[in-house]
Amino acid sequence: MARRYEMSGRTAAMRRTREAILDAAVELFGPAWFDEVTLADVATAAGVSQQTVVNHFGSKIGLYLAGVSERFVPEVTALRGQTVPGDVDSIVATVLEDYEQSGDGTYRILVLAERVAELRQLVEGGGRAHRAWVEHVFAPQLEGLRGRRRERTVVLLAATLDVSMWKRLRRDEALSADETAAHLRALVDGVLATVAT
């Protein structure tokens, strides 16, 4: 009985250590480029040795991918799950809230994936998830559309609400969050107007 207790205590300690490492990684990678953060930085921030980080995640890219899949993706999924399908204001507000929190980091992942092969699958999966979300939240507007017309509408809506568009408006054009929302709404309305004609 004592041995079983010891094993579950050890398992709980390992789980806490893993979570502390992930917390540190999210904190450090969030505002920085992948190349700017080392495993030693993460280990120091988590209060563990670099070897402990390696034991839990294998490598820096393994740690990065775990942080994205275990912390970032669930947060974005929960946020986007609150969107009211068919309500363009709700859709734009959700995208803006998502990107205001995660847009810079998401854009860095897109850029980084061009030279870090391990991230390409992550980016492709994110693209598929974004498109699926667009099809879900615009289902009322897409109803009755078929073939190439439907496909064109989905592609345009997904591109309009992509992080690259947010980055263009919010960072490159230095628009405020409210101005960015208004621009996104105008673009969405423009795409939807082509459906009606």
Image: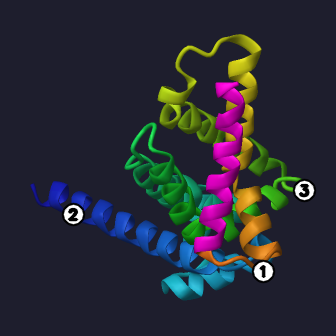
Which residue is at the front of the view, 76 or 33?
A: 76
The disc at residue 6 is: 2
Which residue is at the front of the view, 35 or 105?
A: 105
10 Å crowding of disc 2: few (<14), some (14-19), many (20+)? few
Which numbered disc, 2 or 3, marks the residue that appears first in the sequence?
2
Which residue is at the front of the view, 105 or 5?
A: 105
Q: Is residue 33 left or right of residue 184?
A: right
Q: Is residue 56 left or right of residue 4?
A: right
Residue 113 location in percent, x, y?
Answer: 82, 54
Residue reaching furthest to the right: 115
Mark toward the viewer: 2 or 1: 1
Whole-Å distance between the Cαs marked 1 and 3? 15 Å
Task: State the extent of the magenta-drawn residues as a range.
Answer: 178-197
Which numbered disc, 2 or 1, marks the residue that appears first in the sequence?
2
Q: Give yes or no for contact between labels 2 and 1 (Cβ–Cβ under 8 Å).
A: no
Which residue is at the front of the view, 60 or 141?
A: 141
Q: Is residue 137 left or right of residue 192?
A: left
The disc at residue 115 is: 3
Mark toward the viewer: 2 or 3: 3
Residue drawn at the location 67% of the way across and 31% of the way down: 154
10 Å crowding of disc 3: few (<14), some (14-19), many (20+)? few
193 relative to 5, above or below: above
Residue 189 belongs to magenta span: yes
Whole-Å distance between the Cαs marked 2 and 3? 45 Å
User: Which residue is identified by label 1?
Assistant: 36
Residue reaching furthest to the left: 1
